[in-house]
Amino acid sequence: MPAQEEAANIGKVLSFLREWDRGDSTVRSRMLNTFLAQNTGKTFYELELEFAQVASLFLARLTTWMRLTDQYLMEFLGDGGVLTLLEILNHSQCKEEEKAEALRLLLTVANAGRKYKEIICESHGVKVIAECLVMSNTDETQETSWAVLESLTHGNPKYQNQIYKSLIALMMCSSPKAQQLVLHTLRTVQSKMKTAHHSIIEPLLNMLRSLHVVVQDEAINLILDLKCYDVRPVLLKGLVALLRPAKEEVQQHQNMDACWPRTAKRICRELVTLGVIQHLLHAMGNREHNDAQIQASLALEHFVHSYPVIEEQVQRVIGSTLFAAFMHNADTLYMNIDETQAEILLTNKLNITEGETTNASSPSTYHTFHDAADVALLRSRLLSWYDKEQRELPWRTLRWPTVQDLAAATLEEVNQMWAGLGYYSRGKRLHEGAQKVVSELNGQMPRTVDSLLKQLPGVGRYTAAAIGSIALGQVTGAVDGNLIRVLCRMRAIGADSTSPAVTEALWSLANVLVDPERPGDFNQAMMELGARVCTPKSPLCSQCPVQSHCHSYRKVHVKQEENSRKLLGKLDRKPLSLPDIEDCMNSGTCPLCPSEPWDDELGVQNFPRKPAKKPPRVERTLTCVVIRPGEEGEDEYLLTQRPNKGLLAGLWEFPSLLQEEKTSDVKQKQALCSEISRLLGTRLTDSLLQYVGEVVHVFSHIHQTYVVHSVRLKDGDTQTQTESAQWLDRSALQEAAVSAGVKKIVKLCDSVVGQKQQTSKDGKRQKHVGTKMGKKPQSSKKARLSAADSRQLSLSSYFKTVKEES
């Protein structure tokens, strides 16, 4: 096309777009009808020549219009719009930005509903979009292609199998970005499939050899998902084989994630039967590949801690010296072994059977719920109690009724609502999660426990399980602090409740017990039971609805009967009416049995056992309440905002300074005064700061003492010199995003003011009585101060009025 004609076409299109941007719905509708009428019958190539370099801009307008107008969407599809867009994706000469806009149009179509998804699939759109994902050179096009495929996987059962097979085929592509996106989408599709296709195994295992960690991570997550499908034996065999590959197949990075064996004891036993321990030892000795050594050491560490027989056999094979180094620090062992030790690892012939692991280390059935009838009875009793006794809890807030409302709020507003609740990072993560749902997930919350864990920041195992069961109706247990206590007492689990073995056992118990018909209610009932009946101290066992299912309760009665018979001298005359519940099948080796003797005084509180807590760090912080007269007659207080990361992130506080042990009180007081001067752009001396008192506030890991001072400025025009400081009146201070520590400081000041006012009133009363009785009133300095203080009526009157020094 000649340059002059091309310029004319560009000008015509730009004029069209300007009119489009300025017009209302009526004008735009007329423009579109005119456009369709004028271009009926034209081919893609003719339109491309006419629109020249501005096709992507026009497509963007079409996308916006289509989102707003359902009628136009139907007309667009009726005129072959989907096929046109797919032709754009197939055309090798189309620019990436044009393909990206075409994909955004397809995403709009796909998000419109099931029938529109089917239209795209019937037009062979899955193949075209998949090829675009693989062949694209830009992240934008790849991610938009992935978004369309992800949309097609939801609510599209007719073509679900087609999408599934297409994604498996894409796993062989060479683009790491495409591999990552394909694996992520494949996990979503696989969760909806009843079976897994065997063709998925080989390319999936190959992705563990990828040089890109993000690809490895996605592959590992999919492998973990596949453990419940019929391809598991083949998958496990392939994983074990990866630990000792042929020399010609060795790649720079191998990654069999150490978390894999922790998912289920049955899988662990299958891996042992396949010879995984021997292969892990071999990988630990492969000094050419450090990453494989680290991962193998971490995996073997879990097996050793879980199975005493494996611990014994491994120590026998590699020797006590090397074994001690391994147990001391598994993840750095690779840096400390020499050639001889590496050879021992490489040539080991260790073989452990499944029977050995089952008999030697599995917890006895005493610590489980093995009777289905017993489980059903427990569910029935607990839910009946919950239906009658549940509390009305304010789960919903009128402030932000939807996730979109929460995402639109500022972090300052969230911190303000969260103030005083503690664990302030949770409020921030809640806000970040809502923003991600709106900005990246089209406003739709993830619908499975796995997707909640993967897609939302700050969501851990318990939170995902709680949301999954309560909000989404998924049949999964949810183990919080209350359930740890309840389950440990029910099944007499006395080992360290924070250990991996106990943690996995508790989650397994929770998943066995959860009611499949009412999973959310059951989990809340267990929490309610722990919060109100099975409490940490002074549990109300007599009111427990599942008392008969509790081993700890029975243990208490056994001990009470035994002690009573001893006192009566009848220990040998009559057997106990209740069995001794300490008879565990694997006593001495069971990872769930208590290691400490029973304490009669504790009763059921013998369970759970927790390790001694590390004492909190002791800190002292110098803080100053700075006040000035406000415009409306109310006093205003100076607050500064904490950094966005760390303790109390983003909250407001009085100007403060952490005290240092080796620095004198005078120097630290001077430093605090300098900080206040910097905030206000003026100069104050430390002599103006008046001591108020001390406030103790204990965080989870810090014992904090606030040494409180105060100062009152005379000039009401004093302004802050930084955005991280502000003046607030008393009512605004009460509503601000401040910590409980700040509120304690305010309470201290109120208390001191109240005492001072009472002293003033008493002094005035004494003066009146003394005059009436003909006695000379006191004229001491102390009395004069009391008389002056009697005029004080508010918190602000406590603070010392000072003159600012320029």
Image (cartoon, rainbow, N blue to C red):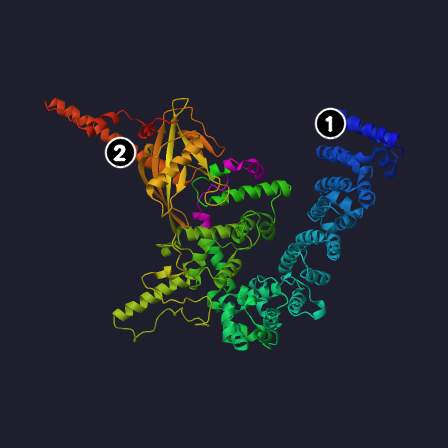
Q: Are marks 1 and 2 in contact (CB under 8 Å)?
A: no
Q: Position of residue 13 (x, y in %)?
A: 81, 29
> Residue placed at 85% from the left, 35% from the top?
47
In what element is the residue under mark 1? helix
Above-or-below relation of 283 to 216: below
Q: Quadrant of residue 610?
A: bottom left
Question: For the point 58% across and 64% down, which residue is it?
Answer: 294
Span of residues in magenta:
386-412
Per the rendering, the mark at residue 21 is 1
- Of residue 801 and residue 201, the one placed in the foreground of this image is 801
Helix, strand or loop at label 2? It is helix
Give the numbered dot on residue 562. Answer: none
x, y percent for residue 607: 40, 61
> Left of 372 or right of it: where is 680?
left
Judge left or right: residue 454 versus residue 758: right
Q: Quadrant of the N terminus?
A: top right
The picture quadrant where one finds residue 679 is top left
As drawn, 264 above or below 48: below
Between 678 and 503, the one lying in front of the other is 678
Name the residue that disc number 2 marks.
Answer: 755
- Amino acid bearing label 1: Asp
From what the image shows, is residue 30 above or below residue 561? above
Q: How far is the residue under mark 1 from the one under mark 2?
A: 69 Å
For the C terminus, the quadrant is top left
Residue farthest front in this picture: 806
State yes or no: residue 735 in magenta.
no
